[in-house]
Image: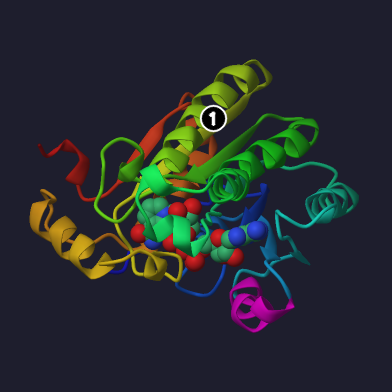
Amino acid sequence: MAIDHPALNILQGKKGLVVGIANENSIAAGCAHAFRRAGASLAVSYLNEKAIPWVEPVARAVDAEIFMALDVEAPRQMEAMYAEIERRWGRLDFLLHAVAFAPKDDLHGRVVDCSMDGFARAMDVSVHSFIRMARLAEPLMTEGGAMLTISYYGAEKVVDHYNVMGPVKAALQAVTRSMAAELGPKGIRVNALSPGPIATRAASGIRNFDALMDEARARAPQHHLVTIEDVGAMAACLASPYARSVTGNIAYIDAGYHVMA
Ligand SMILES: NC(=O)c1ccc[n+]([C@@H]2O[C@H](COP(=O)([O-])OP(=O)(O)OC[C@H]3O[C@@H](n4cnc5c(N)ncnc54)[C@H](O)[C@@H]3O)[C@@H](O)[C@H]2O)c1
């Protein structure tokens, strides 16, 4: 069901950075559309040259004012993105980190068998990159700000086939709380969103994902699957002054799945 976005303009005049759009089905794409509809100006990143044909149409649709490569594993690309934001805007109001990765063998195997390198790489790309983004954003959030990342229920409970991403998302949620505590006095809020399963490219790397979606639909109190538009609506609200007293939160957008035993 599409959301009829009211013209609330809750992000009017705000500048935001969106990292994690792979294509139009990405959760970050749903968020970028919601941010733009709410009035924000956006900087959008793409992973590498190969990704441009899929990311550029989204960037164009949301009138991205900055469009640059950002592979969080590539030295200096993140610094270059922030330098451009400073040059163009002089400040940043919010950011979305929607980035996750684990090497296939580690993602598909038991946590017990996870390699040291695979674990470290999954943690670096999926968690420490959020810390790096926050550190570079802090001096630009001169009027306060909002930082968002995307977690999953597998952080809290063992979800079949989620494997190493469970501990990785648990760390991401702990980082969200720590950074909320550390940056709160500066008026910077840090929150995580926890959507139910959505068929994206990253999700296609998780075995038996169809079964996960079937189970979500069957057990969630609302008995429907959530959409990237649902996540975008919540992200826009959390990025806006409407959520001025909300920080360190894990916001579930899962049709109520997480309350079920
Ligand atoms: N799809 C779901 O069911 C679901 C549910 C809960 C949480 N999430 C989380 O949502 C976030 C977005 O994933 P998605 O489902 O939209 O899939 P997606 O494949 O559309 O997005 C994942 C993004 O991570 C980016 N990425 C991976 N390695 C990177 C790197 N080194 N540098 C920069 N970017 C990199 C990819 O380029 C891609 O844009 C992830 O954190 C994912 O774990 C997804």
At x 15%, y 65%, the residue is: 214
Residue placed under numbered mark 1 in the picture: 175
- The range drawn in magenta is 49-60
- Residue 189, by quadrant, is top right
Q: Nearer the viewer, residue 158 or 140?
A: 158
- Relative to 210, 218 lies left or right: left
**Residue, x 47% and y 64% (percent of image)?**
104
Please give the count of numbered marks on the rendered protein. 1
Whether the magenta-drawn stretch holds residue 50 is answered as yes
Ligand 1 within 8 angstroms of badge 1 C-beta: no
Seen in the picture, residue 195 relative to 175 is either above or below; the reply is below
Whether residue 67 can be seen here:
no
Picture coordinates of residue 120 (x, y %)? 59, 44
Quadrant (top left/top right/bottom left/bottom right) for the N terminus? bottom left
Say what secondary structure mark 1 lies in.
helix
Decide: is 255 above or below 5.
above
Category of crowding for the residue at label 1, using alpha-carbon neighbours closer than 10 angstroms: few (below 14), some (14–19), many (at least 20): many
Q: Where is residue 79 in the image (x, y as percent from the top left)?
A: 83, 48
Q: Which residue lies furthest to the bottom in this view?
A: 53
Question: Which is nearer the eye, 85 or 194?
Answer: 194
Q: Is residue 245 magenta?
A: no
